[in-house]
Amino acid sequence: MTSRTRNLSLFMALVALVLFPLFGSSFYVGLVTRIFIVAIFALSLDLLIGYTGLVSFGHAAFFGIGGYALAIAFQDAAVIHIWQALPLSLAAAGLAALVVGWISIRTSGVYFIMITLAMAQMFFYYFFESSRFGGDDGIFLFFKPVLMIGSEDILKLDHENNFYYFALACLVSGYLFLVMILRAPFGKVITAIKANEHRVRALGYSTNGYKLVSFVIAGTLAGLAGFLEGAHTGYVNPSYMSWHESGVCIAIVILGGMGTLYGPIVGAFIIVLLQNFLPELTGHWQLLLGGIVIAVVLFLPRGATSLFPRIIAFFRSKQKIDPKGPTDG
Amino acid sequence: MADVILKTDRLSKNFGGLIAVNNVTLAFERGQVHAIIGPNGAGKTTLINLLSGDLLPSDGAILFNGRNITSLPPHKISQMGIGRSYQKTNIFTEFSCFENCWVAAQSRINTSMRFFRAARHLKSVAERTEKALELCGLSQRSDSRASAMSYGEQRQLEIGMMLATEPELLLLDEPLAGMGSDESLQVIELLRRLAVDHTLILIEHDMDAVFSIADRLTVMVNGRVLETGTVEQIRNSQAVQEAYLGVEEDAV
Amino acid sequence: MELSFYLVQLLNAIQYGFLLFLVASGLTLLFGIMGIINLAHGSFYMLGSYLAYWLTGVTGSLWLGILLGLPIALAVGYLVERFAISFLFKLDHLYQVLLTFALILVFNELQQILWGTDVHSVPIPAILSGSFQLTENQSYPVYRLFISAACIALAGAMYWVIQKTRLGMTIRAGASNREMVQALGINVNRLFAFVFSMGVGLAAFAGMLAAPIDSVYPGMGDNVLIISFVVVVIGGTGSIKGAFVGAMLIGLVSTFGKVLLPEMASVVVYALMAIILLWRPQGLFGKVA
């Protein structure tokens, strides 16, 4: 797929999503909002597994910390100011990513996978067992964040459509931010690290620093997703950071197509919709989900979006052949 | 006293019980082409890996321009002006030829921790990249994917990446390995051009090539230095004849 | 608190450590020899527990349950190896993680289809149901001692196989240098199948032994899996000795953690791992990469 077709498709998709609340019921607006949030989460993981070559299996920890930072700081507040809550969530998630990254980046391969998993479990159990932060039940939030200037409400997230657009704006900003850093000198280095870290070191880069920064950026972005999820659902509990979430997030990135940025967004649509509609089909929908993921790994390892160029090529070739066929014959 | 750029002092490396490099003391002079020859398993590549920081020495010291660089990590050694190429082609296969050299050239800016402006705006990096591509003879192939290039071209790219880091001293591990004779001639020509303003340390099995471009030779056998000297001295050395060259010429 | 209380905790810690060792040893060998990361390993522990529950119910005896259950577990392990794990060689770690993660989803769901979502318990066999009276108010159940004894016997047998037999030599060589074994012309597929079934057998056996003292519940394999990962990471991948030391350390830290720091019991285990990795990133007995 050329970058022009890609950008055009993305732009058309964006227009469709902007118009969607005008037609969709509030249930579907809420569902798509959730998809945006999951997409931001998956996008952040794509920076690690798709571009830096770091297979983190504990990414849900930062998602959860973003949510908990919001919930802990504002559980008793009557007004949640976005300009206070959002930076707090991002900082908390980024800081956690710095600590986890600092410990785990000294290792590589399977070690890295296992350590990120175990570190995430540490956070999970901390919140699971702490009576101060609600333990198993988590924390409920009774108000939605607002953006105010003076005493004027600019943006109130308690309206579903407002939340929808806010989440969409976050997704678009996150996407553009990642596109920007991948084009910048930093991005050149991390993609090279994924391709051949040893060679990058031999060329004079201290690769661990770049990997750590990438890890922190991804963690912070996951924190943004966690913030949105907490604000959207009105509660935060330990299951946010369960290893199951980390696994599903990897599945989303692979299913959509890693190393593409738009792939994980497509993956988020597929998985969240499956999670929503499979249970209506059967009580044992995880069996189907597991089967789908296995099939993707074995038969479509580059993800659903790797089909797009083939589909486009298929239609192009048809267009070319069809009109020609009769005249030549 | 000659102008020494790199010096090793009783450098050793053991792997478990095996002593791959044993007490190697060598001085490499600035501006010269210094070839290291010896049979397989003589410890040549291990020596290069020690010099480039890819391996840590078990004992001994390495001095570069008078500074002790023993045990420095590879990226620091690279930043000091020592570039290396690998025997097994070690490039970013999914990148274009240009991108391969770009990443190498970009390593010479202050820091690549830059997030906001697209990399392509970095003029100095672009210039270095172009220059490296031209030197290694791949300007025409700039946009080709590295994995789609011929083996010989990949070997040239390997050298081009090293050049893009603008090193003062080049460590070349069998640059001619596996090349056809035409390709070999091209690379030898390239090495000759590089020798004008660089110092080269070269491992090579192709003796004709070695004798045609090297200023000095070191013969290694079983991890030790057997003899070091000018090309003439080595050609005439009794010990070298017996231990190495004789065998090699018989084989050829 | 009195000494006997700590003695009981120590015995508990050792018994837990042994069970973890049985699960983790398969995991560490699988990785050491084949470079495969298998998240579904915990599912075999769960399978063992459920088989023990089911067959004990049918036959009325845990012993018969174990006797009948082990071949079933091995057969399941064989099928999983044939139809899923053997594809993993060619894939890189990312896909291994994802594929075995999907296997967990499948296994957990199959478990619910077969046995439902209730929590079950398995009675302790009558012959081992007593307990030793240590002091007036401290006693220690015989069955837990039996677990430790059974594990010691099994660990001993494993030690013997790995240290003294030809097969064991190949396994050790493979765990420390995979390419070498291939170069020596050993049938890697068969070696792998053997090691994998051994791992399955050990994990399932651990699950069977544990069934009477822990409850049998959905998703029980997941917790064991992650703790076993911690054991493997602490010990160093591919090292049986490391798995043993790691399992004992985790047994001690988590048992005494529950007593001394009840609020942070589970956190302590992971903190221990973090500290060990800061000191030795390759684990206690791992090779430097």
Image (spheres, coloured by chain):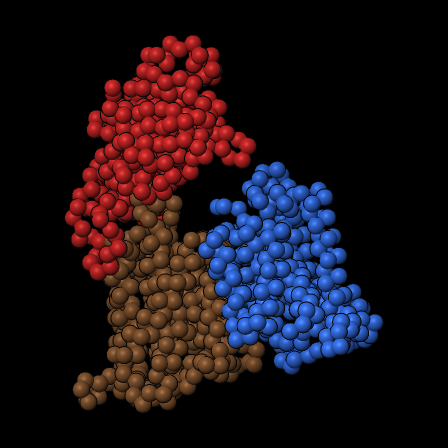
In the picture, one chain is brown; tell me its letter: A
The answer to whether residue C165 is visible is yes
Q: x%, y% of residue C276? A: 50, 56
**C85 left or right of B180?**
right
Q: Residue furthest front?
A: C2
Dividing the picture into quarters, in which one does residue A67 lie?
bottom left
Q: Is residue B186 above or below residue C229?
A: above
State how many labels appear. Answer: 0
For chain B, the rendered hue is: red
- Point 65% across, 81% down: residue: C118
For chain C, the rendered hue is: blue
Q: x%, y% of residue A71? A: 38, 81
Q: x%, y% of residue B14? A: 49, 33
- Point 46% across, 81% down: residue: A132
**A223 left or right of A8?**
right
- Point 32% across, 24% down: residue: B27
- Point 38% across, 39% down: residue: B71
Q: x%, y% of residue B250? A: 47, 14
